[in-house]
Image (cartoon, rainbow, N blue to C red):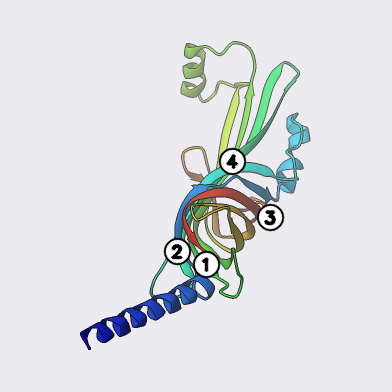
Amino acid sequence: MRRLSLILIMLFFTSYSYAQYEQVGWVSKFGIAGGLTPTWIVPNLDDINSKLPAFGVDKLPTSGTFALGGAGYAYVLFIDNLRIGGLGFGGSVSEESIKDGFNKETSYSYGIGALTLEYTLPFVKGFAVSVGTLIGAGSVEIELHQTKGILDWNNIWNEVSDSSRSTQNISRSLKNGFFTVAPTINIDIPLNRFIAFRVGGGYIFSIGNEWKVANEQSLTNVPSSLNGDSFFIQTGVFLGFFAF
């Protein structure tokens, strides 16, 4: 009788474990991972490029800008297929030239950091297709530089000390800070239980764009299209544990 009871108990736990495996493996995804995420962002640079010929610098590429960052996530246990994580990336592009003896340069920098919320579709087998959103903040910075001749320590101080003194050396930094919400879709393809390849993308909607110049002075009349809105494509190799 004791032996029979033991066998029945073992059969019960074996079948229960198998059922749980089936549920996790085929219905509810789980895992935890993180990795590097090379990203291609495509902001609207038309209003910047319309000004650059007069400045004497080639237009910035409108096809996009490379950015580098990282991301990570973990599936929460209390809601099937929901994963929470974080993401951040940043990149820049620049052009420079020499015109009439002046060294001229302009650069455009973009970066965001955000919380990620994603739901992984349970009916997809063997890999993970996740739809979700980013919630965070970002910034855009435009820098303009013009210099001529030898830059001397004393001359620089003379330029900033005497308001009536004209200078040919110009440096401007225009910054835009914003909040962001971005719908996303990501596909994670596991190479094994511990390495996965990601490809995905989304569209960043910027909220509350606020431009500043110099020592945090407000900048007015900035074109409305010059904001943090941007389409992006993301790839990456993730390390962790995957059960897709």
Q: CA distance from mark 2 to mark 3?
A: 31 Å
Location of residue 129 in the rendering, given as x and y in whole percent from the top left corner: 60, 66
Amino acid type at mark 1: Glu
Q: Residue furthest left?
A: 2
Mark 3 lies on a secondary structure that is: loop
Residue receiving disc 1: 118
Position of residue 10 relative to residue 82, above or below, is below
Q: Identify the residue at image location x=67%, y=20%.
A: 103
Task: Pick the quarter of the image with the N terminus.
Answer: bottom left
Q: Position of residue 202 (x, y in %)?
A: 63, 60
Residue 124, picture quadrant: bottom right
Q: Dot 4 corresponds to which residue?
A: 91
Would you name the residue on which mark 3 appears? 225
Cα–Cα span, label 4 and label 3: 20 Å
Q: In x, y percent, where is residue 239?
A: 48, 49
Which amino acid, by three-letter code, is at mark 3? Ser
Image quadrant in which you'd find residue 13 = bottom left
Q: Secondary structure at mark 4?
A: strand
Residue 220 visible in the displayed image: no
Q: Indicate which disc residue 84 carries.
A: 2
Q: Earlier in the sequence, mark 3 or mark 1?
A: 1
The amino acid type found where label 2 is placed reads Ile
**Nearer to the camera, 109 or 121:** 121
